[in-house]
Amino acid sequence: MRGSATDSPSTPGDRHLRRAAVPLASAALLLPLLGAAPAQSAGDSSAGRLQHAFATASAEYHVPQSVLLAVSYLQSRWDWHAGAPSVTGGYGPMHLTDARTAIATTEHYAEGAEDARGDSERSALHPDIKVSAESALPARLKTLPKAAELTGLTDRQLRTDPEANVAGGAALLAAAQKQLGEPLSSDPAAWYGAVARFSGADDKATAAAYADDVYDVLRTGEERVTDDGQQVALAAEPGLAADTAQLQKAGLGSLPTDGVECPRSVSCEAVWAPYAEFGDGDYGNHDLGDRPVSQAIKYIVIHDTEGAWDGVMNLIQDPTYVSWNYTIRSTDGLIAQHVKAKDVAWHAGNWDVNARSVGIEHEGFLANPDAWYTEAMYRSSARLVRYLAAEYDIPLDRQHILGHDNVPGPTASTIPGMHTDPGPYWDWRHYFQLLGHPFRRTAGPQGGLVTILPDYAANQPAYTGCTTAGEPCAAHGSSEVRLYSDHDVNAPLIKDVGLKKDPTEDVNDLSSRVSTGQQYAVADRWGDWTAIWYLGQKAWFQDPRSAPAAVPAKGVVITPKDGLASIPVYGRAYPEKEAYPAGVPAQSVVPLPYTIPAGQKYVVGDEVPGEYYYAVTFTTDSHRVVVGKDLYYEIQYGHRVGFVRAADVTLEGSAG
């Protein structure tokens, strides 16, 4: 999210604001910093202990074991997360929420911040936003204390003991079943209403969407080894038909849904961002447009909020703030739409990308490795992205489904202030599996390209910068792989000249990191190391056969045309000067401080026409989409994408 960042790599969560120092809600920001328990050691648990815990809780509280397993899978995929709370203060396999233990007072600062609009022709506002703390937490954020009342277990036991946590979840489900006046049946089909209530949703649509997901898990079955080595299995029941009529007894309300653009398989509410005029020619917080008629939507940008749901909903409704198209809630996957897809939200810090993209925020925190995202949110997000991709013909790959951290700075001066979310702890591998487009090997062992694909759980590079005290970040799975200037972990890290500083291992420093799903041309190999072309340099990463960090791929690359010593890289694909009509100021086509030397190759994401959307007034009569003759190619240049002029390059295919 644009609006919740600190300003230096030494402070956690490099999510730059576009305003001055901003104290966000202390009670509304549920930072999961406290209450974490140490991971269980291999010596005090067997690989089947968690499965046994589900069986025990099922027998004690008379909840079908399959229902317990399916609910837990949708919450946490049965992972323990070393006892750390989720982004909304949820603990353990059942995601029992105790937001009281996860509240921290936080301030985010904005010096040198990204301008979310990203158009120098009309700079965005820099408001001083203050969000008031809420006096009470919603019921969905305090299910753990309720479980303690029902079981007689202490809050600490429910937070720190997986078996107690499962028992707490079973007790909540049984209590919900009784409140609905339903018997404690052994038939999984008879628990739909209780599962819907377990979600904590206040409305019928969100509760139903959550329950539908749980029953999808019941029908398909699941099996996996958890993050602490537990083997858990749920047998498929493909013919299971839930008693959905139970939901009528739940007494839940309805959502405002007028005009929302969402798939039927999710719960989606309308929380519209205001398009308002104020002051002397000022307006916010987005621009009216006519996409994809006038300018095609080519990208979907994934963000995290750096704030909790209620505070974020307040921010999006302030016309002096910035905007994005959707936000997704962690606890139950509820989606709120704020800006119509045809309009242009101010979210990515690059006007060219804003004008061609949809931005989706996810309730979460970049620099808290143990503040995990729920499976409910991942699944809801994936369904939304699949829907948008089908609606606007967007390819499901990492050249079109971008992280905010993959968006280039539009000019050289903006590069250091660009955002770094969702960061290394977003699980791109799992996300693309949910999208139905898993990353896989597509070429032979000596293919000329690679797709970055480490094992998320096992890949745990060291990071710093997660706390103000400067301690190392907690060891955690990561989507990203570190790059060195030679095939040696003691060699210097790759330097990004655009950042104007030496590279570090800070969680917000993107100088020398590649991310899962990104593709690069192979530059060299040496034993267990692979080199790629990256930021105009040969960059090395560890890639042993026993634990590969990438797989061979095929695709299309660009290389500088014969006779050119190097070519420039751009942060936006704007048209040539001659394309601008009278009344529309011509935008300068200035390269970034990056080049591609002769002989280097970079993977092509798409062919991009030179376009500029001129929109600097509240009234739309002067708005214009300027289309030029120049063509560009979007390429994977470093951690971020970039653009090169088609006239400067030669296309080459890589068959692998």
Image (spheres, grey):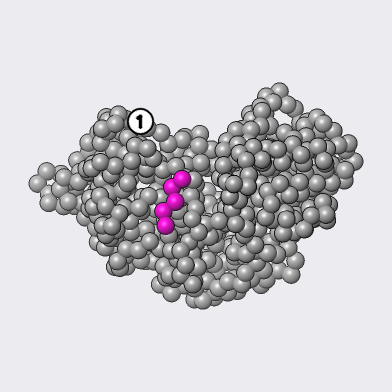
Which residue lies at the image location 57% right of the left edge and 36% below the top edge?
224
Direction left: furthest residue:
563
Q: Is residue 14 left or right of residue 610?
A: right
Across and down, in percent, residue 374 comes to 61, 48
Mark 1 packing: few (<14 Cα in 10 Å), some, or many (20+)?
some
Residue 466: percent from the left, percent from the top?
A: 48, 64
Q: Is residue 494 left or right of residue 41?
A: left
In magenta, the rendered stretch is 458-462
Q: Residue at x 39, y 66 (%)?
A: 417
Mark yes or no: residue 623 visible.
no
Q: Which residue is mark 1?
A: 442
Amino acid type at circle 1 is Thr
**Is 164 contained in the magenta span?**
no
Residue that extends furthest to the front in the rendered view of this protein = 43
Which residue is located at x 64 percent, y 33 percent?
A: 233
The residue that appears at 50% across and 68% down in the rendered structure is: 467
Magenta segment includes 461:
yes
